Amino acid sequence: MASGLVTLGIDLGTTSVKVALLEAAPGHPSGFVVLASCARASRAEAESEAAGPQGREQDVSRIIQALNECLAALPQQQLRKVRAIGVSGQMHGIVFWKTGQGCVWTEGEAAPVFKPRAVSYLVTWQDGRCSSEFLASLPQPESHLSVATGFGCATIFWLLKNSPDFLKSYDAAGTIQDYVVAMLCGLPRPLMSDQNAASWGYFNTQGQSWNLEILRVSGFPVHMLPNIAEPGSVAGRTSHSWFEIPKGTQVGVAMGDLQASVYSCMGQRTDAVLNISTSVQLAASMPSGFQPVQIPDPAAPVAYFPYFDRTYLGVAASLNGGNVLATFVHMLVQWMADLGLEVEESTVYSRMIQAAAQQRDTCLNITPTVLGERHLPDQLASVTRISSSDLSLGHVTRALCRGIVQNLHSMLPVQQLKEWGVERVMGSGSALSRNEVLKQEVQRAFPLPMSFGQDVDAAVGAALVMLQRSLHQKES
């Protein structure tokens, strides 16, 4: 493995933008080192004129401003060495622009930067304008993934019905990460990976193609759909020097943030990645040759997403994670306030984890689904098997942590992971890293070798994909 090779990873998230510089390091266990990274809040939320309170839109110029601030903060002499750029970002969302007028390059104070020009707001994955009645009126996709509000193709259908003139102003569309790649390379037509295309809906992953016939019959503007290319394959080369990154640097076809995050800490194909932060994701690489059944099943707890090299990720995504513990802490603080006592949330959190660590077991049973689940939207939380001896803070906190992990296990059992060939679980995420009890419960429910502490990081994952592709090119 050649040392000295440097790649840049960019992740355009829902609330922040992050960049990371990676260098190949043959002697290092992971094969790379992070030279520098930077994150900036994008603060891009914008009012939606068309969709009103249900709408969730972001101002693209604010996102690009955050990206430029991140790049300005990186060591400029390292940027000169960048050989390839990997880009990932929030999936499902859609932004429209005018071909050839999507941005303008300006010589900034210190460096050339691009600024959005004839570009719409980004309608994000959190957008709620498509009601269930509206979604039910749409044609049935020929895909294993169903269509939901906030998905790019559903948003186009909504605009077609409610704001047809809006669409006439634009002739190109993509996710925010596809837009950035198109602008960096000056692409006449955006390119999109199957990872992002699948997140829009109406895309058949097996045939690697949009459902063109189904869409055409419904009057859908199919000319706006991007061409499909492999994630991380070369989309083009930078058309300008950008900060200190040389003109002519390779840029990869954009990836999904889920796939890039998993890639950042899945050391082996036989690793599963467990991330517990606000919510919970458990992902594993499916055996090669696996093909999902081509009929959407909204009630299935595991979804299959395109990964790299034509493989799939099996993903159980629970809406109930660290947010459930936060709700419990908030409840306790509120009760104390009602009793006339003031106590800090951080104090409550550390004391309850301490109490649960000393309470190794409990008969108390908590189903923690206060937010329901995507496959069970109407489910609520419940507490059963309450006896007077199991009412201490330690018992309740232990049962709550166990409930969060058991809920995930009910969606994707360890037996299933083993059948897929999983041999180790990589644990990450803020809620897991600072909660010893949650770690114990993960080891109890998933008795496989565990490794904690390697954080999922989509910017690192995007840079790593490009690093490994560049090294393969060198070797071949």
Image (spheres, rainbow, N blue to C red):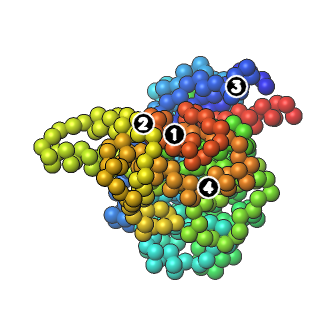
Among the two numbered marks 2 and 3 on one chain, the one whose residue lies closer to the N terminus? 3
Q: Identify the element where label 2 is drawn.
A: helix
Amino acid at dot 4: Pro
Locate residue 383 relative to residue 172 in the image: left or right: left
Residue 440 is tagged as 1
| Whether label 3 touches label 4, CB < 8 Å | no
> Which of disc 3 and disc 1 is earlier in sequence?
3
**For the residues bearing labels 1 and 2, Cβ distance under 8 angstroms:** yes
Q: Amino acid under label 3?
A: Pro
Q: Which residue is mark 2?
A: 357
Which x, y percent locates residue 369? 42, 59
Residue 307 in percent (x, y) is at: 69, 51
Q: Amino acid at mark 2?
A: Ala
- The answer to which quarter of the image holds residue 341 is top left
Q: Are marks 2 and 3 in contact (CB under 8 Å)?
A: no
For marks 1 and 3, give the one nearer the viewer.
1
Which residue is the site of mark 4?
413
Query: What element does badge 4 sit on?
Result: loop
